[in-house]
Image: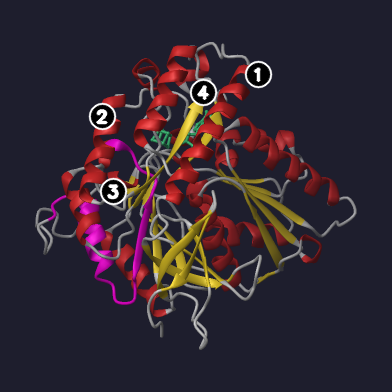
Amino acid sequence: MRFILHTYGCQMNVRDSEAVSALLAAAGHTPVSHENDADLIIVNSCSVRGKAEDKALGKLGLLCAAKRERPNLIVGVMGCMAQRLGPDMFKRLPALDFSVGPRRCGAIPRLVARVLAGETGLLETAGPDETPDVPDVHAVSGFSAFVTVLFGCNRRCAYCIVPDVRGSEYSRPAREILAEIAALARNGIREVTLLGQSVMNYGRINPVWDDSDAPSPSGYTEPFARLLEAVAAVPGIIRIRFTSSHPSGVTDQLVRAMRTLPQICHHLHLPVQSGSDRILRLMRRGYTREDYLGAVRRLRAAMPDFALTSDVIVGFPGEAEADFEETRSLMDDADFDNAFIFKYSPRPGTPAADMEDDVPDTEKMRRNQVLLEDQDLRGAAANQRLIGTFQEVLAEGPSLRNAARWSGRSPGNKIVIFDPPPGGLQPGTLARVRITRAAPQTLYGELANDCP
Ligand code: 5AD
Ligand code: SF4
């Protein structure tokens, strides 16, 4: 079969799609880049907001309709919406061939074989505590890869559907993760991003180290700090990122690991969601505004070049103008490099869905716009401050806009454009770049070393 995957949603979904691609290829199927060339199309769906589901459902509706003209076409759905809707998925889309929850990705090649044998309407979802069947194989090329270390989420933030669809926390054994990363490094991967919904919770529920009590070589006892140290020791891995995080995970050990292990980027995506203590409590986030800002202060004190990005929700039930202003001022105090702003979207079955969605959509839009405009100015100013600094850039390849120049990412995850040396560069090389100019979304600079 020739197959293609369409992926919506977060990095976790990107990783799951990539794993499924590798599995399908191993089963003898061939990836293609155009839908019209494919006879198997899989949509990896997201449930985090109503709009995300609408997009995936719209796409699936079109694909199922296309089956009338292309009777051999197989259409499947995977990801969070598949888990959330369960058997209802087939009520909405009777022509769908299979639907697979995120903890069951590994079943897809078997399901495809069954569809080829004449079955249809196949459903595979998982109970919240089932051990995930997600393959550790990769289909990546290039120098950067995602590695899932923690599945599910045990927090119960009032607005969030994730714990319902991705189940409870399960941390993979460290041994398995390290073997996977070593294999990636042997295949040329130089940067890994460790993934989990609350990734610093790694190892808090189930044991992950064979010698659970022993401190690591540098004296780390927390499972996630130990993992960071062990990943940094994998030969060939020159950069480590991890996402997503929660302020409770910003422990002394984590800060020390970030400060002292040279491979770890000095960047966190640390969603704050709101700056109002009242709303944070209603959201059940488990921290106050001051707790959040305290974590930011500790990170900045340890790493002067620390970059901070965040997520914010506007229009949560009961959010008054004064609460919104608190969020606005928190964003200034925290001085985010970048932030994603979302309009609150009630998710069926979550605690917040029982509260009245009382902020009108026009007001959500206004608040969204105000925060975006603030953030644009703040992000541009943060970039201006980087002029004159040296940034270690992981060179990716020729820039899309101007192929004579190269593009890469700084440790703070900013795009940096620079001229390659006369002898050229290998993608995946670290280049030291002096920043000479800053645009709101991009930095420009000159190579500062004699690169290989
Ligand atoms: N409505 C709006 N935004 C949401 N997020 C999660 N759930 C919802 C919801 N119900 C946002 C949060 C989270 C990001 C991935 O999506 O900001 O950090
Ligand atoms: Fe959702 Fe909260 Fe878990 Fe993040 S920490 S995935 S917001 S429940």
Which stretch appears magenta?
220-247
Q: Closer to the observer: label 4 or label 2? A: 2
Q: On screen, 230 above or below 28?
A: above
Q: Which residue is mark 1?
A: 362
Ligand 1 within 8 Å of disc 1? The answer is no
Mark 3 sits on what residue?
Answer: 202
Check disc 1 and give the amino acid type: Thr
Which secondary structure lies at badge 1?
Answer: helix
User: In the image, which disc is placed on residue 190?
Assistant: none
- Residue matched to label 2: 291
For ligand 2, which image quadrant applies? top left
- What crowding class fits label 2: few (fewer than 14 Cα within 10 Å), some (14-19), or many (20 or more)? few
Label 1, residues with CA under 10 Å away: few <14, some 14-19, many ≥20: few
Q: Is residue 289 above or below residue 169?
A: above
Q: Amino acid at mark 4?
A: Gly
In-front residue for pair 420/114: 420
The residue singled out by tag 4 in the image is 349
Colour pattern of the rendering: secondary structure
**Closer to us: mark 4 or mark 1?**
1
